[in-house]
Image (cartoon, grey):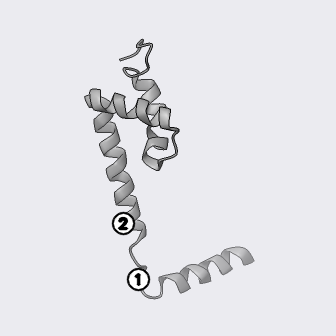
Amino acid sequence: MTGDPTGIGDCEKCEELLQGFLDRELTDAEHELAELHLNGCDYCRRRYAFEASLRRYVRLSAAERMPPGLMARLVQLRGTDAQA
């Protein structure tokens, strides 16, 4: 969906903005442009949904606690690597 002078129909532009959109780092104008495109483009909306769900999965996975003794074992292994 390229060639739209407004940028609303430009999937490449939306893809460039997607990470910033998810991180809430865009300017107001960029946010509005991305939002308009996402509202009208099923493909990009699915990409957004995938990226958002992937971020949730990573956040939840990273929040899991390590099994007891794992940190001590990692420290021990790191010390072994430093000596080699």
Residue density around tag 2, few if under 14, some if 14–19, many if 20 or more, within 10 Å: few
* Residue appearing at x 41%, y 21% in the figure: 10
- Reading the image, the residue beneath label 1 is 67
Q: Residue at x 41, y 78 (%)?
A: 65
Q: Please tell me whether mark 1 sits on a helix, a strand or a loop.
A: loop
Whole-percent x, y for residue 38 in the image: 33, 32
Of callouts 1 and 2, the N-terminal one: 2
In the picture, which quadrant includes the N terminus?
Answer: top left
Q: State the image coordinates of residue 29 (x, y, percent, origin top left).
A: 49, 32
**Front residue of 46 and 6:** 6
Give the camera-side residue of 1 and 27. 27
**Gap in angstroms between the C-alphas marked 1 and 2:** 16 Å
Q: Is residue 17 visible?
A: no
In the picture of the structure, the residue carrying the numbered disc 2 is 60
6 sits left or right of 41 in the view: right
Q: Using a 10 Å C-alpha cutoff, classify the residue at mark 1 as few (fewer than 14 neighbours), some (14 to 19) or many (20 or more).
A: few
Disc 2 marks a residue whose amino acid type is Leu
Task: Establish if 12 lies above or below 78.
Answer: above
Q: Residue furthest front?
A: 28
Q: Residue at x 41, y 71 (%)?
A: 63
Residue at point 61% right, 83% down? 76
**Eyeballing the image, is 8 above or below 68?**
above
Question: Mark 1 or mark 2, which is nearer to you?
Answer: 2
Asked whether, in this view, residue 83 is left or right of residue 21, the answer is right
Under mark 1, the amino acid is: Pro
Left or right: 35, with 46 as reference point: right
